[in-house]
Structure formats: structure tokens, C-alpha cells
Amino acid sequence: MKTERSDRIRAGKVAVVATLIGIGSYVLIALIFNFSLADHMTSQVDSRLGQRLVLAVKSGGQPEGSIVGTPTKESGDLDKDDAPVFVWKVTSSGASTPITNGAPRLPSKKWVAGDGSLRLGLSTFGVRVVSFRSGWLVAGESLADVVRVRDSLINAELIFGAVLLVLMYGAAFVVGMRALSPIARAQRRQREFTADASHELRTPLSVIEAEVSIALSKNRDAQSYRSTLERIGGEGHRLQRIVEDLLWLARSDEERTQHTDEFVDLGAIAFTCTERFQAVAETSQLRLIFMNLGDEDPIVRAPLESIDRLLGVLIDNACKFAGPGGEVEVIVATHGNTVTLEIDDSGPGIDPQERALIFDRFHRTPTLAGGTGLGLAIADSIIRATQAHCTIGTASIGGAKIEVTWRLAVAKSPGRATNDDRFDA
């Protein structure tokens, strides 16, 4: 619960930063767009004012039908939705006379040629002043439409921005949680692994410490000391195997993402590995069989050392479960564009509820004592690193079946065991 809360806090912080960046970009784009739109509309107003003044100059400053309060088709320069353009003739004394129908009263003031704005009644007008004879011609247009469009645009942007803010934060939070999920899972597995490794290493060390303390507590005969040393040696050997397995897993985790161009013959490696375990089979009085089926060379793309270790782990595990007098089958086969390694044993099998857990580090099945609990974790690491697929089921000989499948690699092997090669102890 504490870890989940910490992840949510981190995801929330990431979401806030992402949202601030997104909203900042949105505000910048909105400001640029608003400025461009306002500039465009102002330019249109200036253009209309200029056109009206040209018509006024041509008419000699007299009211004419071509200069009206409402644009006409004859003028041919304005849209019907545009605000009317008004024109006034102003004398040098400041007295103004409208030459456009419906023009509001113009205040008396000192005029200067150029562009500007003027407050007339409740509206602000954009105006342009030009010299005309001994006075001026003043053209003006209400900027109410410009203000209305600007305010409507700003309101729409504010509403859209608020919705965008919520959506961006929610999306960034979800993405942050998903991005942190693998990291949190990896951290959790690392903590669990560290705790399990500490426990596994502590056990043989505690036994060694106890054996030494007991041996030194009082004088004993040579046979007693020898028995103690043998037990200490056994625990030391167990400790060594745990450390070696941990080092292998650490190295495989580090190299898992590295690409390999090595092509190996799975049949040849399986043949050699099965032959190596014949001594173990004879000692346990079990039957170890190898079969190589299919017409194609079972070539896979993977490091030779990893495939050899995988076979060693799976065959050793099968031999332990099969037990004395049991049977283990190692089968390599090609089917179309796939290569399959199948390890069958005649042991008690793996309970369906246990199948999802057997590859966990330090996990041990209740049907088999001993071992470090890392062998199948190493196998799982190799399977994933070589992009293989593994399934667990029930073998035809009664026990567990572990089947690993690779994509058939296009390469020629230097040598392999013959198809349908078969031997047993």
C-alpha cells in the first residue's frame, strides 16, 4: 500500500509537470493566434477606412450615393456583415460635418493626419485622418465587432483550456502510472529477491556457525570432528551453488537486452547434454532417452552457453522429479518454422496451481525437497532472453512436460545428431 501511494504521488508530480508544459504551450499558441487574428481584423478595418476616404476625396467631400452608411454592391469592397464606415469633413476650426448617413456626432478637437482610435458614444472607433483642402477628412468604423470576436474567442479558449487542463492531467497521470508500473514491479521484485537471497544465504551460514560452535564447545574424538567438517563442507557446497546461481542470474539480467548473432544446433547441444547426464541416470537407476525429430536442422539464434545451461537445468530437474526407476525423455523437433525442446518425466507432475510459480526465484515445490530454488529461475531467464516461449503440461509418460519453442533460424549447423537418433541408459 505504501509503495502504491508513493507511485501515485510520483505519477501525480509527473502529470503536473507535463500538464504545465502542455498548458504553457497552449497559452503561447493561443496568444500567437489571437494576435494574428486581431492584426488581420485591424488591417481589414484600415483597408475599409482607406477605401472610404478615397471615395470621399473623389466626390470632393460632398455627400454622394457611393458613400453611404450601409455598404452597397456598387461599392464592391465590403461584406454585408462588416460594420458601417462613416466619413466626416472637418474644417480648420474643428467644426465637423458628416457626409455619410447616420454618422454619430464627432467631437470638436485638434486633428492630426494618421491612424488612431476614438471613443464615440458607447463604442470605440478606429479612425483615419487625411488632409483635405483647408481641413481634414475623417473616416471611422466601430470596433465593436472586433472586440466581440476577440472576447468570444478568448472565452472559447478559456473553456477549452480548462477542459484540456483536466484531460491532460488525467492522461499524463495514467501514462505516468503505466510508465512507473514496470519500474515499481522491478523494484518490488528486487526487494523480494534481496530478502529471499539473504534468507537463503543466512541458512547455510547459520548451520556452519552452529556446527563450529558445537565442535569447539568441548573436546571430541576424530570421528566427531570429521562428521562436523563433512556437514560444514556440505553447507559450504550449498552456499557456493547459491552464489554461483545468483551471479548467473545477475549476469543474465544485465545481458538480457543485448543482441546475439550466434546460431546453435539445439539437437547437437541436447545430445551432448543428455549424454553428460547418463551417469546421473545410471546412479538413480532411471531411463534417460534422447530423440531428435524432424527433417530440418534445429537451428536457433541464441548463445551456446545459455542453451547448454538451460538444458542442464531442465534435465537435472526432470531427473530429480522422476526419481529412482523413473524415466526422462529429451525430445528436439522441428515443425514448420519452429524448433521445440520437450523435457518429459515420469514423476508426480506439477500441480496446475504451481505452474505459474515454479519459475519464481527461490520457489520450491512441496513435492521435491532440497535445491536452491534458482534453477528454474535461471531457465526462465534464458527462455526470455532468447525470445522463446515455454509451456508446462502433463507428459505422456505421466509426469511433467516442459516445452520450449524457438523460431527456426536460417543457418547451417556444422554438425548434429542424426534425425530420430535415440539412446537410453
Image (cartoon, rainbow, N blue to C red):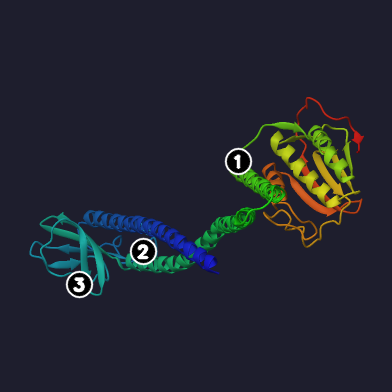
Residue on which the image places disc 1: 255
Horizontally, residue 257 falls left or right of residue 375, namely left
Q: Secondary structure at mark 1?
A: helix
Residue closest to the far top: 414
Q: Amino acid at mark 2?
A: Asp
Q: Residue placed at 23% from the left, 74% from the top?
A: 121
**Toward the viewer: 219 or 20?**
219
Percent coordinates x, y for residue 145 in the rendering: 34, 67
Label 2 belongs to which residue? 82
- Please report whichever mark, 3 or 2, sits nearer to the chain's N-terminal start: 2
Dot 3: what SS?
Answer: loop
Quarter of the picture holding the N terminus: bottom right
Q: Residue at x 18, y 69 (%)?
A: 106
Q: Can residue 335 be seen here? A: no
- Residue lying furthest left in this view? 93
390 left or right, relative to 104: right
Count of numbered marks:
3
In this view, 265 is above or below 42: above
Q: Secondary structure beneath disc 2? A: loop
Alpha-carbon span between mark 1 and mark 3: 86 Å
Q: Quadrant of the C terminus?
A: top right
Q: Residue at x 79, y 56 (%)?
A: 368
Left or right? Give the position of 401 relative to 122.
right
Q: CA distance from mark 1 to mark 2?
A: 71 Å
Please name the amino acid that badge 1 sits on. Glu
* Vertical order, 72 against 424 (above or below): below
- Amino acid identity at mark 3: Arg
Say which quarter of the image contains residue 408: top right
Residue bearing mark 3: 105
**Quarter-wise, where is residue 383 in the image?**
top right
Pointer 1 and pointer 2: residues touching (CB < 8 Å)?
Answer: no
